[in-house]
């Protein structure tokens, strides 16, 4: 489902907001630890690009429960612990207790939702480093997040180690002036 982001609300925005309210209600009632990440999180942190989908990260232990309560909901991608094979390496991305304590609550299409910390979302985007040719804008999203949010570089560096992503992520973030 394509969404138009901006000051004017479209019917699609309203429809996605309604769907998101239902998703939030179901996941919260089921006791699932969850957070929005990827492009929708970048939007919550200042990206003005159109949100084309909503990705939800859950603790791996909650993945089966989350998929069960959302089995009839289309257009929402739910994942647990991720193992990403890109650029000749394997990188991790997951919710643990450390991330869970730093989850932010932001408005997305009129719904207050949990969002992965900006630092973790920056790392996720920096691991993938997808380009416009792939219809993705990871570096652009990172620049927007850095410009619009206070980034805790110590937390970010610790998370890079946890995700096994230092060699892949650090050069890009250094080139963007993050450290």
Image (tube, grey):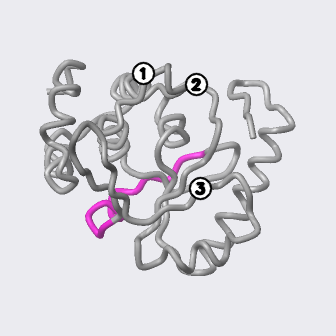
Q: Which part of the image, by quadrant, shows the N terminus?
A: top right
Position of the C terminus, as image quadrant, is: top left
State the CA–CA distance, disc 1 to disc 3: 22 Å
Left or right of 61 in this view: 75: right
Q: Based on the displayed image, in which of its 4 quarters is residue 141 positioned?
A: top left
Could you tell me how far apart the alpha carbons at marks 3 and 2 are, in whole angstroms? 19 Å
Q: Residue at 73%, 28% (x, y): give it.
A: 4
Most foreground residue, 6 or 56: 56
* Residue 176, position as x, y percentages in the image: 24, 19
| Magenta highlight range | 96-107
Q: Are marks 1 and 2 in contact (CB under 8 Å)?
A: yes
Above or below residue 35? Residue 108 is above
Q: Would residue 153 be found to the left or right of residue 19 on screen?
A: left
Q: Residue drawn 47% across and 52% down?
A: 115
Residue that badge 1 annotates: 140
Residue 49, disc? 2
| Secondary structure under the numbered disc 2 in the rendered image | loop
Point out residue 44 in the picture as x, y percentages from the top left corner: 52, 39
Q: Earlier in the sequence, mark 1 or mark 3?
A: 3
Count residues near mark 2 (Cα–Cα under 10 Å), then give few for <14, some for 14-19, many for 20+: some
Asked if residue 103 lies in the magenta stretch, the reply is yes
Residue 90: x, y in percent? 24, 51
Q: Mark 3 against mark 2, which lies toward the viewer?
A: 3
Q: Within the magenta stretch, is there residue 65?
A: no
Q: Which residue is mark 3?
A: 77
Pick the front one: 28 or 139 = 139
């Amino acid at each position: 489902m394509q969404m138009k982001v901006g000051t004017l609300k479209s019917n699609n925005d309203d429809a996605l907001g309604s769907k998101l309210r239902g998703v939030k209600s179901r996941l919260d009632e089921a006791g699932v630890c969850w957070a929005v990440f990827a492009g929708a999180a970048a939007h919550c942190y200042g990206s003005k690009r159109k949100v084309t989908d909503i990705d939800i990260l859950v603790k791996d232990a909650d993945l089966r429960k989350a998929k069960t309560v959302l089995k009839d909901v289309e257009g929402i991608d739910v994942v647990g612990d991720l193992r990403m094979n890109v650029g000749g390496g394997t990188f991790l991305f997951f919710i643990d207790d450390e991330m869970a304590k730093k989850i932010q609550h932001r408005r997305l299409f009129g719904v207050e939702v949990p969002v992965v910390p900006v630092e973790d979302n920056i790392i996720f985007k920096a691991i993938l480093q997808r380009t416009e040719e792939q219809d993705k804008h990871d570096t652009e999203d990172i620049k927007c997040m850095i410009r619009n949010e206070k980034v805790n570089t110590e937390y970010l560096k610790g998370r890079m180690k946890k995700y096994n992503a230092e060699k892949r992520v650090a050069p890009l973030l250094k080139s963007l002036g993050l450290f």
